[in-house]
Amino acid sequence: MSKKYVLKTPAFPAQFTIDYPKELNPSQLEVVMKADGPCLVLAGAGSGKTRTLIYRVSHLLEKGARPEEILLVTFTNKAAQEMRNRVELLLKTKAKGLWCGTFHHIGNRLLRMYGRSIGLSEDFGILDEEDSRDLVKACVKSLNIQAVGARFPKPGIVQSILSFSVNAKKSISEVVTGRYAYLGTFIREFEKIRALYNEKKRKTNNLDYDDLLVKWVELLQKSLKIHERLTRQFRHILVDEYQDTNRLQQELIYSLSSHHKQILVVGDDAQSIYSFRAADIKNILDFPGHYENTKIFKLETNYRSTKPILELANQSIKHNVHQFPKTLKSIKNEGTTPQFVKVRDNRQEAAFVAQRICELHEQGAEFSQIAVLFRARYQAADLEMELAKRGLSYVIRGGVRFFEQAHIKDVLAYLKIVLNPMDELSWIRALTLQPGIGAGYAEKIFNLVEKEKGDPRPVALPSFGENLPPRVREGLSGFKKTFKSLIKEDLKDSPDVLIERVLDKGYNQYVLMNFENARDRLEDLKELVNFAHTYKHLKEFLADVTLRESFKGESILESGAPDEPEDELILSTIHQAKGLEWRAVFVIGLSEGQFPHAKSMESEEEIEEERRLFYVAVTRAKEELILVHPMTRYDYNEGTVINHPSLFIEELPSHVVDDLEVEEETGNEKTIYLS
């Protein structure tokens, strides 16, 4: 009878002992040395959570844990690689075998290794987002759902509904009712699409991104052998940014940690702002209830911001009921009190912010160390125009310039035709928005218009385009109705009225059926109407927009881009700014109904997330924080409206901000100054 010889993997060959007390503050040190068993680390903004995680992993390896026994889950591949590199730098040796990556990266690895246990081939393909949308489109076509008509949502929206359902572990009905109520009549169609979509993936041996987690869960549930192997292998599990996990990810963590229960999660409930991506703050809030004898650690020493900025942040977030209370403490005792600046309207807000940025630059601040943050994309429209006029170079972080967004350019195409009936590009863009009209037929229709020497009136005549196919004629009919409303009277002195008519004649409905973030885009369009109201002539309005579009000093910085501009001002939504920091931060649009958003006032959960968003914004500032409130705004339907200050300003004690008002000098040169 043969005997077995077991070859043991040697312990991690740490060459040097780290002086942890010297390298860490007392709170960080306590986590690194004592975080055994179930542990929740509440890491406040700027408190060095990444450093703490890295030293904890290093300590585990020094104590004898093998790299393959450690699972470190992050939310970006970049963060995972950075953590691995820093661990190896600390210990001066390779951490070969360490499981470090995103949920999807780890899921892919495990399914390649063990997927056969659930009937999954190891050479399965992975569908990216575009592939997934194309497959959804194919399903819609196979089911003949296009017969429902032009009102059926685009594949991207359907795919978003399916994905949210998976990650939030909710039914399609729950997702549609809660997030896409205007699509409630299509719930049965969505369910049919999901069934066919899953079947097509199975037949073609493909998984989408969500499947990497779904099949991972299935693997753990259906194969007791693999479940035991993995839960025993991963002796130490560490999860970063736990407040951003969804229900599906939570289920994975609970399952994997079921044997050793050596689970350490790091996060900050006060920075949970991604519910629209299915992140669930209850994961972190309920963590102690899921694990007996959970140890809770708090990292409250902030290395980023001055004491006055943190005082404001602490005073704001304490109004949230559902939270783990924390008090951020600065290592910087001195600092300027945050300013609360009242301006007349959005235009004066833009002028003030632009001038103040120039002053900060003259005082030695680099533009790249100054950021303007906002709740919604449209709030920066006036500022972008002002910066362009002043020739100030800036970056839009993780997004597209306001006037270059698809929905804005769609509407402007109609206005450009009114001003210049020979604008071929605008004709083709506007026509292809109609169901049944592709680029080819749009060009043919424009050629018919061109034969009329640019006279747009023929598009309103029944005979125009009568030789075109039925679906094209139907789409052209919709275009005629819209365009007829634009030219039946002279509206060239009313660009706001022109935009409103484009929206009312069908473009609002188009947005709902074609864009996942339809609510945000409708708000952008409403603001575009208000913005256009300040112009007396269509020609001037479009000229200014063209100036904005052609300004070469601006650029776009996609989220996670490797190379950031050397010295350009940053404009960003607050969601895109999380995890970043700047010397000076402006938060604009701090008016009730805008920030917090009006619809958030309908539920306690939503208003608390809005307050967390405000908390994230103010804790991005290192030295100077300027909060700006426009006291009035123009609304197309209501005229000039008085703006009340944001709830998040009103609930602050008076000593944490300096109130300032902006005045205008009445000389030949208009100047904004603080009184």
Image: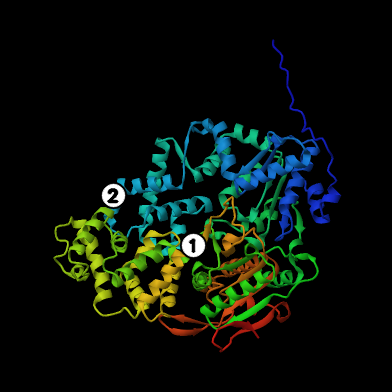
- Point out which mark residue 552 bears: 1
Pick the quarter of the image with the N terminus: top right
Query: Which amino acid is tagged 2?
Result: Asn
Determine the secondary structure under disc 2.
Answer: loop
Q: Nearer the viewer, residue 375 or 569?
A: 569
Q: Position of residue 266 (x, y in %)?
A: 69, 52
Residue plotted at (67% across, 82% down): 659
Query: Which amino acid is tagged 1?
Result: Lys
Q: Nearer the viewer, residue 216 or 632?
A: 632
Residue plotted at (47% across, 65% down): 551
Mark 1 vs 2: CB contact within 8 A: no
Judge whether residue 292 can be spotted in this image. no
Q: Is residue 231 left or right of residue 406?
A: right
Residue farthest front in this picture: 668
Could you classify mark 2 by the number of other residues whose Cα lies within 10 Å: few (under 14), some (14-19), or many (20 or more)? few
Q: Is residue 469 left or right of residue 400?
A: left
Residue plotted at (41% across, 68% down): 546
